[in-house]
Image (tube, rainbow, N blue to C red):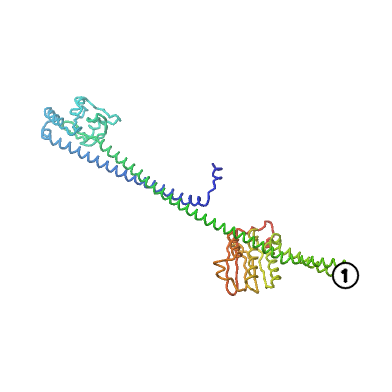
């Protein structure tokens, strides 16, 4: 799997899409789970409250039923003796007749566990049910008698529902008649309450799923917007990149053609004319030698001078194309040689100053700064009309800076900003390539060009060397 991830290469647009999508997906998922959790928790509290209220209502209803029943036969129970069997029979008959609804009725157990009244389940009458439990093991008779002995109270258990014949949870209210040692009560099934609660929980689940769906739809819409926006930006950036690439390619071709034209002119105007002079001198010397003219040696000397000049011109052109001193000695000596040659060729007073610093400039930085210096001196020679030029190379904590200033007429503002020449464009592109900065300050009193390369293009000091900063720039 690691190899598969290592092979995965994302484009800039894909990285941008992932960078925008992952936080959105994470935030959406967090919001969805938080909303779901809060919704479920709130709904569960409401459902429990609803269940509690409904059950309390049922309990109050049961208490009212038993109280009304007691009031219905209290005129008998209140005056009867504890062993008045006739009164007990009458009261039992009254309670057996109190049937309400489809399932409601009253029951009576004595404290020994014998069932005395059970109109809905007559098979229970006359039998002792002490120790009886429901299908889940919950005590029924013993617990009802225990509550009756304490006065009154509620008890919940499973009991067959007469209308369906199936067990369901029932809440019972029982009251004790201590003189007769009777447990009298009635119950109500709460399966309707449980069904209502279950329906409410199901409705909550539906609402939560619907909320998830809405959040997912919103997140998907946002992702589509991000994707389409990224796609449009990618297409736009690609069109711009293609246009810039075409423009850059054209600039490279123009620069190549310009350089070829310059070399061709120098070869034609310099070396070619010198070699023509050498050929002419050799022809004259040959004729004079054949004629025995004593001036033949003088003509050969002049030809040798011209040939030496041709050799020097070839070396100059080679140095302009790629100075060997740049690779052999470093940037500082190469710039020093460049300014000396510029001073000798143009007669413009040129000064070069540098401080040898411990960190060396790498090859890309040396070439870029040298070409910028070369281009700046060419512009001074062709356009500035300057009489003085100063060049300075310094290293500092942020990298290295090459500064070239002259006292010429300055650059035309429209030419420098709106339509920069190929030389200025080359300078800027070289700095952009290195991640550096190029500043051009121009006025009627002169021009200053500053090229700064970052610290990443400075090599560390050579290990084991002298602590004195002697490392080449």
Residue 373 location, x and y as percent?
A: 64, 65
Asked if residue 206 is positioned above or below residue 268 in the image, the reply reads above
Residue ID at (31%, 44%):
45
In the image, taking residue 287 as reference, residue 273 lies left or right, namely left
Residue nearest the observer in this picture, 149 or 239? 239
Residue 167 location, quadrant: top left
Query: The C terminus lies in which quarter of the figure?
Result: bottom right
Residue nearest the observer in this picture, 230 or 149? 230
Residue nearest the observer in this picture, 258 or 425? 258
Residue ID at (11%, 27%):
86
Residue 409 location, quadrant: bottom right
Q: Secondary structure at mark 1?
A: loop
Residue nearest the observer in this picture, 299 or 208? 299
User: According to the image, label 1 marks what residue?
Assistant: 293
Residue 336 location, x and y as percent?
A: 69, 66
Query: The N terminus lies in which quarter of the figure?
Result: top right
Q: Are there few (<14), some (14-19), or many (20+) residues within 10 Å of tag 1?
A: few
Residue 381 location, quadrant: bottom right
């Amino acid at each position: 799997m690691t190899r598969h991830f290592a092979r995965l290469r994302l484009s800039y647009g894909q990285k941008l899409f992932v960078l925008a999508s992952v936080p959105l997906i994470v935030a959406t998922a967090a919001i969805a789970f938080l909303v779901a959790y809060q919704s479920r928790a709130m709904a569960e509290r409401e459902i429990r409250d609803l269940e509690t209220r409904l059950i309390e209502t049922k309990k109050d209803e049961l208490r009212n039923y038993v109280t009304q029943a007691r009031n219905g036969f209290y005129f008998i129970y209140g005056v009867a003796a504890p062993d008045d069997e006739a009164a007990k029979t009458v009261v039992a008959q009254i309670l057996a007749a109190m049937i309400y609804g489809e399932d409601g009725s009253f029951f009576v157990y004595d404290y020994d566990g014998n069932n005395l009244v059970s109109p809905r389940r007559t098979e229970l009458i006359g039998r002792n049910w002490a120790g009886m439990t429901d299908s889940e093991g919950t005590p029924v008779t013993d617990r009802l008698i225990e509550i009756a002995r304490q006065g009154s109270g509620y008890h919940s258990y499973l009991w067959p529902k007469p209308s369906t014949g199936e067990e369901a949870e029932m809440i019972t209210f029982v009251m004790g008649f201590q003189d007769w040692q009777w447990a009298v009560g009635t119950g109500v099934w709460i399966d309707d309450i449980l069904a209502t609660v279950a329906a409410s929980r199901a409705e909550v689940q539906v609402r939560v799923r619907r909320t998830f769906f809405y959040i997912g739809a919103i997140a998907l819409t946002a992702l589509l917007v991000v994707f389409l926006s990224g796609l449009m930006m990618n297409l736009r950036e690609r069109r711009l990149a293609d246009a810039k690439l075409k423009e850059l390619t054209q600039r490279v071709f123009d620069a190549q053609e310009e350089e070829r034209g310059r070399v061709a002119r120098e070869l034609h105007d310099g070396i070619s004319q010198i070699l023509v002079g050498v050929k002419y001198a050799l022809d004259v010397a040959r004729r004079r030698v054949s004629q025995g003219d004593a001036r033949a040696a003088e003509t050969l000397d002049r030809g040798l001078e011209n040939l030496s000049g041709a050799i020097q011109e070839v070396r100059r052109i080679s140095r302009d194309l790629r100075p060997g001193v740049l690779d052999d000695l470093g940037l500082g000596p190469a710039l020093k040689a460049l300014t000396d040659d510029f001073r000798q060729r143009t007669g413009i007073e040129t000064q070069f100053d540098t401080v040898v610093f411990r960190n060396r400039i790498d090859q890309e930085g040396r070439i870029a700064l040298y070409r910028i210096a070369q281009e700046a001196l060419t512009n001074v020679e062709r356009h500035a009309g300057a009489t003085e030029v100063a060049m300075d190379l310094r290293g500092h904590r942020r990298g290295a800076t090459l500064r070239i200033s002259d006292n010429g007429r300055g650059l035309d503002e429209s030419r420098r900003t709106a339509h920069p020449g190929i030389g200025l464009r080359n300078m800027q592109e070289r700095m952009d390539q290195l991640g550096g900065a190029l500043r051009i300050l121009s006025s009627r009193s002169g021009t200053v060009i500053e090229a700064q390369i970052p610290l990443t293009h400075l090599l560390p000091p050579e290990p084991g060397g002298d602590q004195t900063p002697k490392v080449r720039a």
